[in-house]
Amino acid sequence: MSVGEPVYTASHALSAEELAAGPPTIDISALLSPGVAEAKEKVVQDIAKAATKWGFFQVTGHGVHQEDIEAFDSAVTRFFGQDKDYKYKIKRTAGNS
């Protein structure tokens, strides 16, 4: 790779069919339980491919309860629904990560 050459160009690497299908969904349950090494390796390969081609992916089979996901989503919605002055009080800075 030469200087100035793009390191990541995922949006240019996707075909029309891939774009129409949407981002990948990956079931990671094989990583969370004892099992066949080949199944775990496939999940790892799927993640690498999705991260390389898309830059992100949706995860299923993670074991997080739906109630927890909904509570998180509700908290995020409430927070971002606040006015700008409220949110800026807790703005991230170099000293406040």
Image: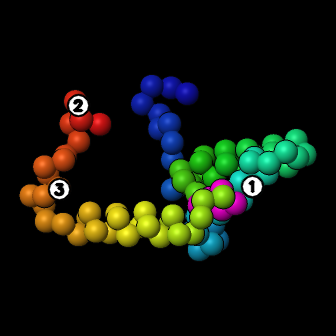
Q: CA distance from mark 3 to mark 1?
A: 36 Å
Element at label 1:
helix
Q: CA distance from mark 1 to mark 2?
A: 36 Å
Q: Which residues are magenta?
A: 58-62
The residue nearer to you, when weighing 46 against 96, is 96
Query: Can the viewer see residue 5 in this picture?
Result: yes
**Quarter of the image where the C terminus is located:** top left
Q: Identify the residue shown where x is 85% and y is 49%.
A: 39
Tag 3: Cα neighbours inside 10 Å, few (<14), some, or many (≥20)? few
- Tell me which numbered mark, 2 or 3, is placed earlier along the sequence: 3
Check if residue 93 falls in the magenta segment.
no
Pointer 2 residue:
94
Residue type at the position of mark 2: Ala
Which numbered dot is residue 29?
A: 1
Magenta stretch: dominant SS?
Answer: strand
Q: Identify the residue shown where x is 59% and y is 64%.
A: 65
Q: CA distance from mark 2 to mark 3?
A: 17 Å
Residue type at the position of mark 3: Lys
Q: Identify the residue shown where x is 88% and y is 41%.
A: 37
Q: Compared to 21, does 44 lie above or below?
A: above
Which numbered dot is residue 79?
A: none
Task: Examine the image and state in which quarter residue 96 appears.
Answer: top left
Pointer 3 residue:
87
Question: Left or right: 3 with respect to 52?
Answer: left
